[in-house]
Amino acid sequence: MTQVAKNTVVTITYSLADSDGEILEQSEQPHSYLHGGYGNVFESVEKALEGKQAGDAVDIKMQPDEAFGEYDEQLVRIEDRSLFPDNIEVGMQFEGHGESSGEVHIYTVTDITDDKVVVDGNHPLAGQALNFHCEIKEVRTADPHEIEHGHAHGAHGHHH
């Protein structure tokens, strides 16, 4: 059987839970990715899957810095209410650019007053330790095109 190694395409089903065991995200369909440091999945997941084969299941406890990062107070911003549409609600998300880095952050509205809106650019799971459970469905050698492009073809999963 093919083992998980660099330049294999690994198909997994997974679930992500917080430290209380509440399921945050679950794969509805198997997710295929190209293994070997291409940034398609968390590094800690790749390390845990290395050398495994189809039929194996892996549980990984991820610290915040291995998952979505530590919580960064500086990404919380207070903006003028007039900058936002009238129908704004807590929980809505906007794209915004970091002032210094120019990186695009997704800002989530966390509070609204009459004239101010508080938005938080942290990932909703920032600062949380997570439990990642996955089951390996299939492992195959990647073809040269996939390696060249750095991702598995025919993968419908989203990229983090």
Image: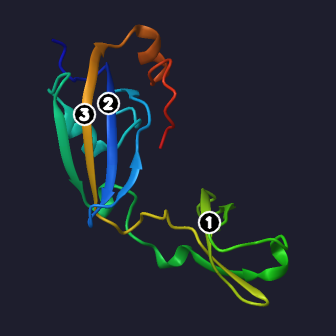
Residue at the spot x=74%, y=86% of the render? 116
| Residue topped by disc 3 | 135
Residue contact between numbered discs 3 and 2, judged by CB atoms under 8 Å: yes
The N terminus: image quadrant? top left
> Would residue 4 appear left or right of 13 to someone viewing this image?
left
Asked which secondary structure carries label 3, the reply is strand
* Kind of residue at badge 1: Tyr
Above or below — where is 99 with respect to 146?
A: below
Q: Position of residue 157 (x, y in %)?
A: 49, 33
Q: Which disc, if any, is residue 107?
A: 1
Residue contact between numbered discs 2 and 1, judged by CB atoms under 8 Å: no
Query: Which quadrant of the figure has residue 29?
Result: top left
Residue contact between numbered discs 1 and 3, judged by CB atoms under 8 Å: no
Above or below — where is 43 with respect to 139?
A: below
Q: Residues within 10 Å of mark 2 (few under 14, many from 20)?
A: many
> Would residue 7 appear left or right of 95 to someone viewing this image?
left
For discs 1 and 3, the disc positioned in front in the rendered view: 3
- Name the one closer to the observer, 88 or 83: 88
Query: Which quadrant of the figure has residue 135?
Result: top left
Which of the two labelled residues, at mark 2 and mark 1, occupies the earlier sequence position?
Answer: 2
Asked which secondary structure carries label 1, the reply is strand
* Kind of residue at badge 3: Glu
Q: Which disc, if any, is residue 12?
A: 2
Q: Which disc, if any, is residue 116?
A: none
Which of the two labelled residues, at mark 1 and mark 3, occupies the earlier sequence position?
Answer: 1
Residue at the spot x=49%, y=38% of the render? 159
Above or below — where is 150 with respect to 100?
A: above
